[in-house]
Image (tube, coloured by chain):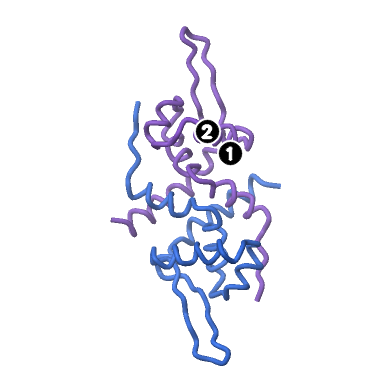
Chain colours: A purple, B blue
Amino acid sequence: MIDPICPKFEQAATLLGKKWVGLIIHQLLIGPKRFNELETEIKISGKMLSDRLKDLEQQGIVKRNVYNEIPVRIEYELTEKGKSLNPIMNELTTWAERWFE
Amino acid sequence: MIDPICPKFEQAATLLGKKWVGLIIHQLLIGPKRFNELETEIKISGKMLSDRLKDLEQQGIVKRNVYNEIPVRIEYELTEKGKSLNPIMNELTTWAERWFE
């Protein structure tokens, strides 16, 4: 029997199913982060991180805060839409704890 | 401040963060499926689906049931480890409903 996939679910799963996105969101749920902090924590290339952050900004999940200090300070932060991913991450943490060594 | 990522979470997020995996698990949560059903529902290439299913089998998330009928019948089914992903998928469905048109 063919069970069609709900388009909304498909969009969400495709977005969150991109490599690195889960880890980026997980880290930003801790709090706003600088680019190099994310780069270090996730062990991701600068190019890939930049692409993913732009994508997440366009999707309204991440916002980029620029602070006019010298030198200028830039931080990435989850929007409300991004922060509402928290329950998914909590369930994923629970699953990971149970099934991975 | 650098917040290291828990290795267990990283393994789980990396596994589930592979393209198509979320959709494959979502469909198998409905029930056991044949290869061509998954192919049709997810609109994924046979090669990619075969690779992902082998990967998920090795991870103990999917099992392959072979029924000695004529012709032989093969179905893919979630293991207990796979079925325990259900809460994550439910949260993802809730999030998708709220944020996508």
Look at the picture and state if A69 lies above or below A79. above
Q: Quadrant location of the N terminus of chain B?
A: top left
The picture places residue B12, in percent across and down from the top left corner, at: 40, 52
- Please say if the residues under marks 2 and 1 sit with CB atoms less than 8 Å apart: yes
Check the image and name the residue furthest to the left.
A101
Estimate how packed mark 2 is, as few (under 14), some (14 to 19) or many (20 or more) residues with alpha carbons within 10 Å: many
- Element at badge 1? helix
Q: Residue at x 37, y 48 (%)?
A: B9
Residue corresponding to mark 1: A81
Q: Residue at x 33, y 54 (%)?
A: A97
Residue corresponding to mark 2: A78
- Element at badge 2? strand
Look at the picture and state if B9 lies above or below B60. above
Look at the picture and state if A46 lies above or below B81. above
Q: Chain of mark 1?
A: A
Badge 2 amino acid: Leu
Look at the picture and state if B74 lies above or below A85. below
Estimate how packed mark 1 is, as few (under 14), some (14 to 19) or many (20 or more) residues with alpha carbons within 10 Å: some
Badge 1 amino acid: Lys
Check the image and name the residue furthest to the front.
B47
Q: Residue at x 32, y 46 (%)?
A: B7
The picture places residue B3, in percent across and down from the top left corner, at: 34, 33
Q: Observer-nearest residue: B98 or A67?
A: A67
The picture places residue A59, in percent across and down from the top left corner, at: 63, 37
Q: Residue at x 48, y 39 (%)?
A: A25
Residue B86 circle label: none
**Is circle 2 on the same chain as circle 1?**
yes
